[in-house]
Amino acid sequence: MKIAYIMQKEIRESILTPKGFLWYAITSMILSVLSYLFLTNSELSLLDQGQMLYMIMNFITALGILIGLVFGADAFAGEIERGTLEALLLSPITKTEIATGKLGAALTNWGILFAISLPYLFVVGKGGQNLFVGIAYLALLGTFLAITFSAFSMGLSSRIKSVKNSLIISFFIFLLAGSPIFLSAAQRGTWFGRIIDFINPFAGAINTFDSVVIDSQGFGYQAGRVAIICGYTLLSLWFLKRSVSRLEM
Amino acid sequence: MIFLAITANYATASAADRITASIDPPIIQANMGDKITYVGTITNNSDRAVTNIIAYISLANVTQGRESPMDLEDWSANKAIKVDTIPPHGTYKGQWPMRLIDSGSYVAYITVVDKNDNTPISSTMSRLEIKRVLRLNPNNVLPVAVGEPMIIGVILTFIVIRRRKRII
């Protein structure tokens, strides 16, 4: 109940505001342009449908991570800077419950993004291969990644106590996570690229999408990567719990 | 001198005559997005088996002002085929499926490389004409691409108005 209250408060303050909701309007516009170009542009429309679906899934996942990091960076440091954390800590609610409520709001945000992307995924993937299984993997891995990066960023925010510094470190983490985009296919095939792919949860997710949607491979191929992403999720939840337990004014 | 010239001429002629290559169909007219398949036939005209030869397809854009060789990776074509052996007077048929991704006039041809010869063997050219196709609303993308931002815009406007009323 207390967790639900914190979650409601966060959703009211961060999502149901003109500025918060603008994220979704921009996301929807970008997805509209992307989908329309994919299906009508003379060169892009000739991409394999699985490839189009895969690219939109990557975009949604990256956006989910980015917004999760921003949410997380503001979670505790923002309360400190606005002078509202003291009141929150004095209320009859534990620090873990506060963190859980805030994480719930970040997950709601991911849920809205996922819901916004669904019509586009259906339109782009219509008649193509592995649409439904691709969407199921996006829901599963996207949720794990949203929890991982939001929880990590929240933990960081409670330790650093500065929105600006939390954001800078979070963006740095986001760039590291996005490293597969900067490496060429040949570089990713080297031992260095393989290690980066292996330890990077975002790379794990996009490789899974590739394997499921484009190569039509079964769960047996994905199990290792899914397990690693789950491991990161548990690790970041532990980091958040530990960071919040030390939180003081 | 005459003997050397005749010998050299004979050697060149035998290299080209030993293996011949052809491509089918000789002319294709299709639309962008279509999938076509070229069939390359490699014939061993000699009395000895030919081993370990490589055959690959090339595509060149010959449209006026856009002349250039094409990167076949973009056309989803398997470029090279390794042929282990062709028996004496036997043939090998290789297939090169590809997706037509851009309009224009092209020529396609097969090249066969035998490491025992110095001269690659090319087939005759197949003419490929690709027509541009314009699609405005494939997969009913327009209702989603226009409708969803509008719905979110309406919700955003509702939130803004409610906020302003609260402030007033």
Image (cartoon, helix red, strand yellow):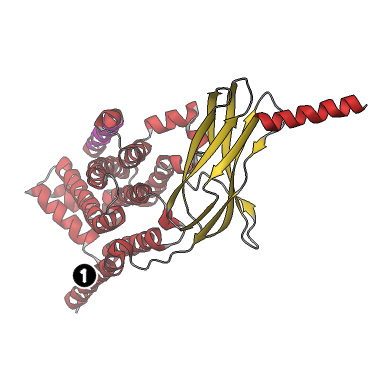
**Where is residue A131 shown, x and y percent of the image?**
26, 47
Query: Mark 1 — on which chain does it sit?
Result: B
Residue found at x 59% / y 27%: B53
Residue at point 48%, 38% (across, down): B95
Dominant secondary structure of the residues highlighted in magenta in the image: helix
Please indicate whether residue A89 sits to the left or right of residue A59 in the image.
left
Label 1's element? helix
Q: Position of residue B113 (x, y in %)?
A: 63, 31
- Vertical position of residue B113 compared to residue A30: above or below: above
Which residue of the protein is positioned furthest toward the left in this rendering? A1
Tell me, yes or no, whether the highlighted magenta stretch contains residue B35.
no
- From this view, report whether residue B152 is shown above or below residue A169: below
- The residue labelled by disc 1 is B155
Q: Inspect the image, locate mark 1, and give the three-letter code of the amino acid beneath it.
A: Ile
Q: Quadrant of the C terminus of chain B?
A: bottom left
| Residue A55 visible in the snapshot | yes
Seen at 41% across and 47% down, the residue is A171
User: Within 10 angstroms of label 1, few (less than 14), some, or many (20 or more) residues?
Assistant: some
With respect to residue A166, does B3 lie above or below?
A: above
Dividing the picture into quadrants, the one containing residue A194 is top left
Whether residue A227 appears in magenta in the rendering, the answer is yes
Asked which quadrant contains residue B140, the reply is bottom left
Front in this rendered view, residue A30 or B115? B115
The answer to whether residue A23 of the structure is visible from this angle is no
Question: Which span is picked out in magenta?
Answer: A225-242
**Would you say A157 lies left or right of A171 here?**
left
**Is residue B34 found left or right of B4 in the rendered image?**
left
